[in-house]
Amino acid sequence: MPFTLFNNCNLVESKRNRTVKCSILVFNDKIFKLIFHKPGNEKLIYHLRCIRPDLQIINLENKYVIPGFTDSHTHLLAHGIELQRVDLSKCCSLDECLQKLSTAKNRDIIFGVNWDESLWIKGKKEVLNRVLLDRISRDKPVILRRVCGHCAVCNTKALESVQKHWKIVDRKSGWLYEDAALYLNQIFKPSIEMYKKGLKIAIKEALSLGITSINEITDIAGFTIYQAFKKYLKLRVAIYIQNGLRSAINMGLESNLGDEFLKFAGVKIFIDGSIGARTAALRKPYQNSKNHGKLLISEEKLLSIVKMAQDNSIQLMIHSIGDRSTDLVLNALKLAGLGKNPLRHRLEHLEILDSKQIREIARLNLIASMQPNFLRWQLPGNMYEINLGHRYKNMNCFKTVEKAGIKSILGSDCMPLGPLYGISLLVKHPSDAVRLTPAEAIALYTEIPPYATFDEDKKGKIEEGYFADFVVINKNPLIKENLEGMKILNVVVGGEIVYRAKS
């Protein structure tokens, strides 16, 4: 591969909160040299042209360059499947959801995804049930899964395929919670062609948003799909297998096994559900109810899982949203004796935390993987306040977690994809005390995430010796006002331009 010079750019240094003019010389897939625009350096570029007549020069025209974004919590393959189903994410009422499903009657399975009742101006999710969906079809399965993935409702025909080993199922109403809702692709299996198409269109979307690496959560079947269609990967994928610890051990997998484009990173386990489904485990009950949510496994079981993972060199990604759930997790990890956490176990979501829990997370050297996208529910009168009352004001405390010295990384959970969307929410956090600056937010999407997958010496920075993974944007992202209307112009992975915006 010839040398490539990405000439004339403004390099964004988030740690120093500044930009510097430079050119980036790439050889093979790594950054060979940064040529800063100082007197005399123009001669260096001239000499490069002389000694390397095959030098490819790409003029970035003084646009801004940042390291490629890492989405540290995605379900990209599942997102690709959902893009081929009935999208209900923009529906403003229950009737609109049902109407969209009715127009899909020609499909073998009528599968609606990503409805969010917090956007509805009419209708309540409590009205949804099996009988209502039977009106759409009695002969074909009809499924509606909420945006969080932790609950869904099915018609009578669909329930026939939900076998008895799925535990949290209300067969009278047609509601599915947690295990059955999360694993609907195991019950209603997509075809190989659907997986192939889904992977290609989802990767294309991710690249257009500046994402060059993902921490992907899928099942064993999904892992196999990634391996089979590896040639389509234009971004770097670290796989976490859902509830697949024994399978991973039986397959001889250890964390960090693979190559620079596809590797096994660890195993995800669920301790509780979601706030939207009212299944996240809370110390105090949900608003106007006696419901404290659900703990999906016991502390004893979790301790056994942690020890098994430790013995087999497998990193754990632990889903915990509620404060009661996080209490259980932290106590189990404390009993497990992690030391300095060499496997870099990580906690996912952590939407409700108190100061004591934050101190314990820091003491155990755990990674906090959080989702700025959820801030859209943290406005007055929205889903968090409806479900939690006044507690909603203290949620998603990104700044507090970072100030405690905890390694913090950010992901989308595909709700929706898009780091620029997450950054814009972080700098407008409803709480002044935990609001981040653009520089702080960018670092949590670029420089910090590679630590979670043992890649901190090769990704996340625009420095010599690191992978040439970077994003070209039209405005200086360190200026808060520029975040509105910011555009991804080019995305480079391994020195190759893998995305170009349409002019």
Image: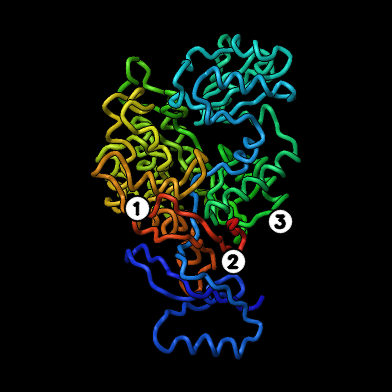
Which residue type does callout 3 highlight? Lys
Of residues 216 and 58, the one nearer the viewer is: 58
Q: Which residue is mark 3?
A: 231
Q: Secondary structure at mark 1?
A: helix
Q: Nearer the viewer, mark 1 or mark 2?
A: 1
Q: Which residue is mark 1?
A: 481
- Residue 400, compared with residue 8, is above or below; it is above
Which residue type does callout 2 highlight? Gly
Is there a contact, CB below 8 Å, between mark 1 and mark 2? no
Q: Which residue is mark 2?
A: 494
Which residue is pictured at 55% across the width and 90% down the height? 47
Percent x, y of residue 270: 48, 34
Percent x, y of residue 372: 40, 43
| Figure quadrant of residue 263 | bottom right
Q: Residues within 10 Å of mark 3 (few under 14, many from 20)?
A: few
Q: Residues within 10 Å of mark 2 (few under 14, many from 20)?
A: many
Which residue is pictured at 45% across the width and 37% down the height? 319
Residue 373 in the figure: left or right of residue 400:
right
Q: In the image, which disc is placed on residue 384?
A: none
Q: Nearer the viewer, mark 1 or mark 3?
A: 1
Separation of residues labelled 1 and 2 (CA atoms): 31 Å
